[in-house]
Amino acid sequence: MKYLGKKLFTLVMTLFLVSVIAFLSFEIIPGDVVSSILGTEATPEREAQLREELGLNDPPVVRYVNWATGVLKGDLGVSYRYSKNMNEMMPVAELVGDKLPVTLWLAAFSLIMIIAVSIPLGVMWAKSNNRFLDAALNVVTQTTMAIPSFFLGIMVTYIFGILLKWFAPGGYVSYEKDPWGFAGYLLFPALSIALPKIAMTARFLRNSMLKEMQSDYVRTAYSKGATKRKVMYGHVLRNAMIPVITFLGMIIAEIVAGSIVVEQVFGLPGVGRLLISSISTRDFPVVEILILYIAFVIIFVYFLIDILYRVVDPRISEK
Amino acid sequence: MTKRTFPKWNTYTWVGLLMTGLVLLLGIVGLFWTPYSTTQMNAAEIFQGPSLRHLFGTDNFGRDVFSRVMEGLSATILISTVVVLFAAGAGIVIGAFTGYFGGVLDEIVMRITDAVNAFPSILLTLVILSVLGSGRQNLILSLSIVFVPSFVRIVRGEFIRLRDADYIKRARLMGVGRVRILFVHILPNIFSVFWVSVMIGFNNAILAESGLSYLGIGVQAPDATLGNMLADAQGYLQVAPWYVLAPGLTIVWLVLGFSLLSEGIRIGGAQDD
């Protein structure tokens, strides 16, 4: 429990630091927000009024505190670029809200694919003594790992979308309208994110298992008459999975990064596309929130992995 | 013990060297000469398939794709070389000092590298680029910053491993200066591990650069890089698949070559020990 408390404290501190950095780095950017929203034609009175509305006259520390307390209460600020109508600015929360499920589902689909394929593949690879299979898997995984996700996405579009016509490239339906259609449109983007990671994880698991198979406890288990099956799944796989769990944490962070690029390839209206367009239009309130959100996901995943690690390997908590 | 600055060669190293060498050569030649102009438009030759005249076909403006791939390659190679040189150089200096001397500074540097390493490099670069603004110089600058920690980590680990080795202790007793111990006595012995990380660094730099240029945040048109060529070509997937395949497969080829090289050096290095 003491460990959990300490970890939670680190989690909160890291998030605090990230939020400070995310907020302040956009403070040092040259250029006036107000004139970029209103254009150069605006009257000085209107500029002063907007400056007051956005709280731009306060010193940075006050602005950070206002922003951070707002975020904690669920008020994420207003976008500089999008507006609801002539008089009302678009709240960031509304802008981000309907984009979140797309990215989360995309990440979840790819993670499921990675785990479902790479673990059986890695085990089979470690178990096989077939030199041809070994060489073939080696070549295939090396090559797959070398394909950048955006090129893979384009290739998937070409093969499954244009040649086989299994889906309409660039198409999308929202979750509310048609859950199955929504899942269908996410399937191929998820595949493009997952493929290189499947190759990576399978290689990693295979190497981890090969290392474990040389341990003394494996010999002992065999000499006690355990079957190969029992040794492989009961002993080797369990121990080999420990480093794989940490590896998967890293993979999840990579999936988040991959989804940003792949959303662009497939034209999915997710967080990644919003981030890219907000960066290009310099819509900083949106960028800040998205950075904070992505950082939170990654930090939280590492936190969960740390906890899971202790559950799987009790030796660590004894030390 | 014979000192080797580069580990024993094996099949991986040979194939990797051949693959990267070929493409690097194309890229270097591309700096000075391309078969056709990379900007000259030619309405008569729009979307021609690959042929002997145009090895990789032509694009929507009738430009020769092979020439543009050469130009894109040289941009990609130039950017990743600068990034890796800077990041590896800084990584050696910071990693050597923190690893060898330890202490509070080491602790602080390690916390920072841990934090940076936790985030995918493309994401961090994206964040820095959104502050600095896009473009070639800013891309190089932000990638260089983002790549330093991974080198620091590896170099530091090796210096910790070697700082108490017998021959280092002996050198200390003989009164060899600290800086000389760091860079003359220890550094040559970490080269096999270091080369592996340089090759992986190249890969990551190439992937990050082309990814960001694909997203339109890295190198901007009209300058060609493999990444922004892909972004242009994607719209013509149906009419001109070769236009997409040429830059895409070039990236795959280059990255695969570097990973085979790193694999080869790793295996060779393990055999040397």
Image (spheres, coloured by chain):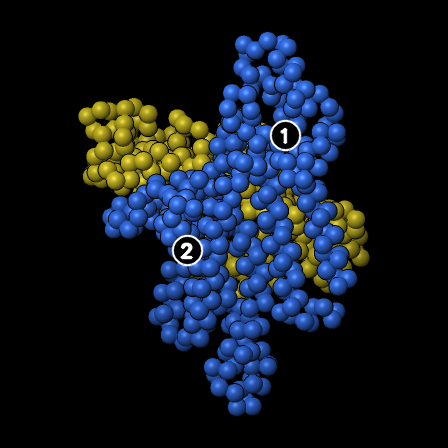
* Nearer-the-camera pick, A275 or B191: A275
At horizontal 51% and vertical 27% (from top left) the residue drawn is A84
Query: Residue A56's x, y, as percent?
Result: 68, 22
Chain bearing mark 1? A
Earlier in the chain: of badge 2 and badge 1, it is 1
Q: Quadrant of residue B189?
A: bottom right
Distance CA(mark 2)–CA(mark 1): 35 Å
Residue labelled with disc 1: A26
Residue A117 image-quadrant placement? bottom left
The total number of labels drawn is 2
| Residue in the image at 54% along x and 15% along y | A39
- Bin the neighbour count of mark 1 within 10 Å (Cα to Cα): few under 14, some 14-19, many 20 and up: some
User: Could you tell me which secondary element the residue under label 1 belongs to?
Assistant: loop
- Chain A drawing hue: blue
Which of the 4 image quadrants contains residue A177? top left
> Is B55 left, or right, of A86 in this rendering?
left
Q: Are marks 2 and 1 in contact (CB under 8 Å)?
A: no
Q: Give the residue pinned by disc 2.
A: A195
Front-most of residues A102 and A2: A102
Q: Secondary structure at mark 2?
A: helix
The answer to whether residue A168 is seen in the rendering is yes
Is residue B184 visible in the rendered structure shown here? no
Question: Callout 2, which amino acid?
Answer: Leu
Q: Is residue A196 left or right of residue A28?
A: left
